[in-house]
Image (tube, rainbow, N blue to C red):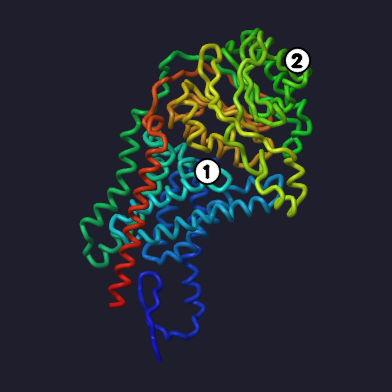
């Protein structure tokens, strides 16, 4: 009878090649799969609206324990389970109004990227200093998810779960790639420190180089974050402005809020007029300009005289420029547009959203989707078109960069506004279609990270909440509730200096991708050489 060694955890045992596995052995084989999925859930729990950012570290520590020393094929499956555990609860809001099929399809596709990361991490886990290579491989996965398919979907970047964490200043060093890399490196480093400590207790023999790398993987990200704190400041560099954020609310939550488009416009005009009355009564300061949310006027004010009159009335009442979120048809094309509305001159500038949302603002694979469910194509009868230019409005002398809703998830859209001269950023959004889900809080955390990344005040006017004012240090100073009409007024700093993240742009991400490529190349080469040696 032939026998073979079968690996179970960290020990080997002999069993007959064809002998049936016992129930206990089957349960042991399921342990890594369960650990991978549960560590993904732990990573989800670290994300907003919870402030448990530190749970990302044990999540990656467990993920590293599951993957270390395994084959790339095992890493592929375990990575997919980790991705499902993380993304299924994180993205459940995508099915709030359209049912579970789009949600499950999105998660199934996005988890494939995490599966490939799992295969890569398993491959490099046999190398010296493996936590460094492994963290870089994770960055490659995020970079890919942010670009494909359909121009990418960066939701769930590790950086977006760190708005309350000690690592946040690293966003100013190298943006979301460096911030995410540091967190993942620290998590893998945590496991390596624990592993080597346990090994030392058993054998009293640990290589100094391995111990040093493990400790540095844990300590360097924390030390780097502390060293980066001077980059984070909320001091005014070019004066201040008093800004007003309007949340008019919507008649009802869900996809059919849009069926009462005029009511949404009226609500925002009414709240602006209430603000004007409070200013006149001396209850609040006179703002220098007013910011309305995305879709605050889905009635095209260029084509509808009554909509134009409503906006004109609100602008004259408050007496300062308003940035209005509209849906505009021009030359037969639809645009999700921000319109700068002057109280005397009317519309004077526009910005067309550039990163439009697949399956929301345009429908890829329309014929295939229609064959599956005609209701989905009926909800998106006409695709929106993309803008081509950055949007920076000069409002009462201040340069305000516009980043419309979904665009806040993408590194390039936010940076382009700052490099185009924006002294502050506004993220007009419409979250009414997602009801009271966690989506609003996840998106708000993105804006906090962007504030630190580029050292700019960020305002977040939302139709139904949560609207907020965020300082350049990432702190929220005011916010509204959900599904209430409200306004926020505050004096905020204008800043003109740029952070290293703004200056470097995509370069830190490229460097980390090259680092991962080097590690994967080393691992593949070592594997080939090992197989050749065995065959000799």
Element type where label 2 sits in the image: helix
The reply to whether residue 487 is in sight is no
Q: Residue furthest front?
A: 331
The vertical placement of 54 against 298, above or below, is: below
Residue sitting nearer the eye, 500 or 190: 500
Number of other residues with Cα within 10 Å of mark 1, as a class: few under 14, some 14 to 19, many 20 or more: many
Seen in the picture, residue 287 relative to 435 is either above or below; the reply is: above
Q: Quadrant of residue 317?
A: top right
Q: Nearer the viewer, residue 469 or 55?
A: 469
> Is residue 380 in view?
yes
**In the rendering, which numbered label is found on residue 309?**
2
Q: How many marks?
A: 2
Q: Are marks 1 and 2 in contact (CB under 8 Å)?
A: no
- Can you name the residue that lies furthest to the bottom here? 1
Q: Quadrant of the C terminus?
A: bottom left
The residues tagged by marks 1 and 2 sit, at their Cα atoms, a distance apart of: 39 Å
Tell me which residue sits at (31%, 59%) in the image.
127
In the image, residue 310 above or below residue 282: below
Q: What residue do we see at 43% from left, 26% from top?
A: 455
Report the disc number at residue 154: 1
Task: Provide residue 424's location: percent of width, then percent of height.
Answer: 49, 22
Mark closest to the chain's N terminus, 1 or 2: 1
Could you tell me residue 464's position as x and y percent? Answer: 67, 31
Q: Nearer the viewer, residue 306 or 170?
A: 306
Q: Secondary structure at mark 1?
A: loop
At 56% from the left and 17% from the top, the residue drawn is: 243
Badge number at residue 209:
none
The picture quadrant where one finds residue 337 is top right
**Which quadrant, please, contains the N terminus?**
bottom left
Q: Position of residue 456 (x, y in %)?
A: 46, 25
Q: Position of residue 462 (x, y in %)?
A: 63, 29
């Amino acid at each position: 009878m032939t026998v073979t060694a079968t690996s179970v955890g960290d020990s080997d045992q002999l069993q007959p090649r064809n002998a049936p596995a016992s129930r206990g052995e089957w349960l042991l084989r399921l342990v890594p799969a369960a650990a991978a999925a549960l560590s993904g859930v732990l990573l989800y729990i670290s994300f907003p609206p919870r402030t448990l950012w530190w749970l990302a570290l044990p999540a990656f520590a467990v993920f590293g324990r599951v993957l270390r020393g395994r084959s790339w094929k095992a890493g592929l499956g375990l990575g997919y389970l980790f991705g499902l555990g993380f993304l299924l609860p994180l993205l459940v809001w995508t099915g709030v109004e359209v049912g579970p099929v789009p949600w499950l399809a999105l998660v199934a596709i996005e988890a494939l990227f995490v599966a490939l990361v799992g295969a890569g991490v398993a491959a490099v886990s046999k190398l010296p200093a493996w936590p460094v290579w492994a963290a870089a491989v994770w960055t490659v996965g995020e970079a890919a998810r942010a670009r494909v398919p359909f121009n990418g979907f960066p939701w769930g970047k590790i950086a977006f779960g760190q708005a309350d964490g000690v690592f946040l200043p690293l966003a100013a060093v190298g943006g979301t790639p460096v911030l995410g890399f540091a967190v993942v490196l620290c998590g893998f480093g945590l496991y390596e420190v624990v592993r080597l400590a346990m090994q030392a207790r058993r054998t009293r023999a640990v290589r100094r180089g391995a111990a040093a790398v493990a400790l540095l993987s844990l300590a360097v990200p924390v030390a780097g974050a502390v060293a980066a704190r001077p980059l984070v400041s909320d001091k005014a560099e070019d004066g201040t402005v008093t800004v007003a954020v309007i949340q008019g609310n919507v008649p009802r939550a869900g996809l059919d809020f849009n069926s009462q488009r005029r009511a949404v416009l009226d609500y925002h005009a009414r709240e602006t007029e209430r603000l004007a009355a409070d200013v006149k009564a001396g209850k609040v300061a006179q703002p220098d300009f007013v910011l309305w949310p995305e879709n605050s006027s889905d009635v095209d004010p260029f084509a509808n005289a009554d909509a134009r009159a409503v906006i004109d009335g609100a602008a004259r009442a408050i007496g300062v420029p308003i940035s209005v979120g509209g849906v505009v048809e021009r030359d037969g094309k639809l645009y999700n547009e921000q319109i700068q509305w002057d109280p005397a001159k009317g519309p004077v500038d526009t910005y067309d959203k550039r990163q439009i949302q697949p399956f929301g603002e345009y429908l890829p694979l329309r014929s295939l989707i229609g064959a599956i469910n005609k209701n989905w194509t009926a909800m998106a009868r006409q695709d929106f078109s993309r803008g081509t230019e950055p949007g920076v409005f000069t409002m009462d002398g201040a340069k305000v960069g516009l980043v419309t809703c979904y665009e806040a998830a993408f590194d390039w859209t936010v940076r382009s506004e700052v490099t185009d001269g924006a002294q502050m950023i506004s993220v007009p959004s419409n979250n009414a279609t997602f009801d009271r889900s966690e989506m609003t809080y996840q998106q708000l955390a993105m804006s906090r990270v962007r504030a630190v990344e580029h050292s700019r005040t960020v305002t977040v006017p939302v139709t139904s909440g949560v609207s907020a004012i965020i300082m350049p240090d990432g702190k929220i100073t005011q916010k509204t509730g959900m599904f209430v009409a409200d306004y926020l007024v505050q004096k905020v700093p204008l800043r003109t200096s740029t952070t290293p993240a703004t200056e470097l742009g995509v370069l830190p991400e490229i460097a980390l991708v090259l680092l991962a490529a080097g590690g994967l190349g080393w691992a593949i080469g070592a594997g080939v050489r090992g197989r050749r040696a065995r065959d000799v």
